[in-house]
Image (tube, grey):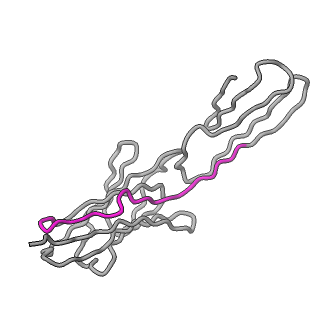
Amino acid sequence: MSSTVYDFVVIDDHNDTSGDGLLSVSINAEYFGRNNRNKEFDIEGDHGGQAYLQVNQNGQEFVQALQDEAELQSHEVGLSVAFYTNSKYLEVEVGGTDASRFEITRVYYVHNGNHDFADWSGQMEPTGDPGQSGRYLVYVSVYTSQNLGKVDYQAYIQLTGYSGGSSYRGITEIIHHPPVE
């Protein structure tokens, strides 16, 4: 059996002789791109027979929180949380009943090892496209100037990605439990 890779498609030829044959078609990589991709093949037989094959793979858009919750200790004044996404437009918000304790101080993203910092104004459009199987790693830093004190409180950081009229959300809970004395 021999294998040949064409872009993202792998074709395995199960016959090493002439005559009737069997081809297996598969995708060779996990795909994180937002755009659909396709590859077309014209297949010619030994005796003039011809076939056409088209392989399609749907793009996807996603936002994934890399941690479900982040706990602040009483002496801490801020934290950063991370998300994976390939969305074209991003919004970040701090929400929940204790959201007023927090301020977003920085949002930046990493793509192909490059750090890109954005002036945070409530919405961000990462430059470029993450590519065929790329994704952005987005960091959100928040700060609180208030004394965390001895009160339990809870808030969340939500990253929302937009593209093509749809939205995708990832949420990380921020939790503070004061030390027991």
Q: Nearer the viewer, residue 175 or 101?
A: 175
In the displayed image of the protein, which residue is found farthest to the bottom?
Answer: 97
Left or right of 95, for residue 41: right
- Residue at 68% x, 47% y is 56
List x then y, in percent, for residue 157: 34, 68
List x then y, in percent, for residue 158: 38, 68
Above or below, 1 relative to 60: above
The segment highlighted magenta reads: 55-76
- Residue at 69% x, 29% y is 12
* Residue 71 in magenta stretch: yes
Left or right of 140, for residue 54: right
| The quadrant where residue 149 appears | bottom left
Above or below, 9 relative to 130: above
Left or right of 163, for residue 53: right
- Residue at 15% x, 74% y is 148
* Residue 41 in magenta stretch: no
For the image, the number of numbered tags is 0
Left or right of 45, for residue 135: left
In the displayed image of the protein, which residue is found farthest to the left?
Answer: 181
- Residue at 17% x, 65% y is 73
